[in-house]
């Protein structure tokens, strides 16, 4: 079992959730059940899947949940791009979200790599 609260990637994912919720409050209200909901769910999925994997019984289980978290990060990246295309977020917001997501994706990959090295 791993201590998820100590993982920097979980901490960054948690901050990202807050940032996404704040940004989507300004989106058009008719997107509440569309892109807003999808962005929030994919953002929340990142740290929650990391935490769930840490609660598992093996590094293989953690690795599987890291894959799910990473998939959610790529989904959110696509939604951020679409939000920029639809002019729901500014260029500056897009660049900040893009950088945060790229960092999280790299951190998840690095954590997966470290798991595979310890199991070799």
Image (tube, rainbow, N blue to C red):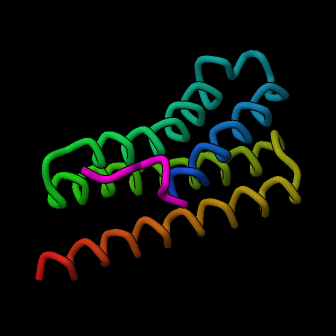
Residue 39, image quadrant: top right
The residue under the point 49% across, 69% down is 107
Whole-percent x, y for residue 67 in the image: 31, 57
- In the figure, 68 relative to 24: above or below? below
Whole-percent x, y for residue 113 in the image: 30, 77
Frontmost residue, 11 versus 20:
11
Whole-percent x, y for residue 2 in the image: 31, 53
- In the figure, 92 relative to 72: above or below? below
Where's the C terminus, which quadrant?
Answer: bottom left
Frontmost residue, 90 versus 64:
64
Magenta highlight on residue 105: no
For the image, the number of numbered tags is 0
Whole-percent x, y for residue 8 in the image: 54, 60
The residue under the point 41% across, 75% down is 110
The residue under the point 71% across, 31% down is 21
Tell me: 24 left or right of 2: right
Which segment is the magenta one?
Answer: 1-8
Tell me: 76 left or right of 65: right
- In the figure, 66 relative to 28: above or below? below
Frontmost residue, 82 versus 20:
20
Residue 45, image quadrant: top left
The residue under the point 67% across, 54% down is 81
Residue 87, image quadrant: top right
Magenta highlight on residue 2: yes
């Amino acid at each position: 079992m791993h201590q998820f609260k100590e993982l920097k990637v979980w901490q960054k994912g948690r901050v990202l959730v807050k940032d996404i919720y704040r940004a989507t409050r300004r989106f058009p209200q008719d997107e509440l059940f569309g892109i807003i909901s999808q962005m929030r769910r994919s953002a929340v999925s990142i740290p929650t899947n990391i935490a769930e994997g840490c609660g598992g019984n093996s590094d293989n289980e953690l690795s599987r949940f890291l894959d799910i978290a990473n998939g959610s990060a790529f989904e959110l990246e696509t939604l951020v791009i679409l939000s920029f295309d639809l002019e729901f977020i500014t260029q500056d917001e897009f660049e900040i979200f893009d950088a945060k997501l790229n960092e999280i994706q790299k951190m998840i990959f690095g954590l997966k790599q470290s798991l595979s090295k310890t199991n070799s």
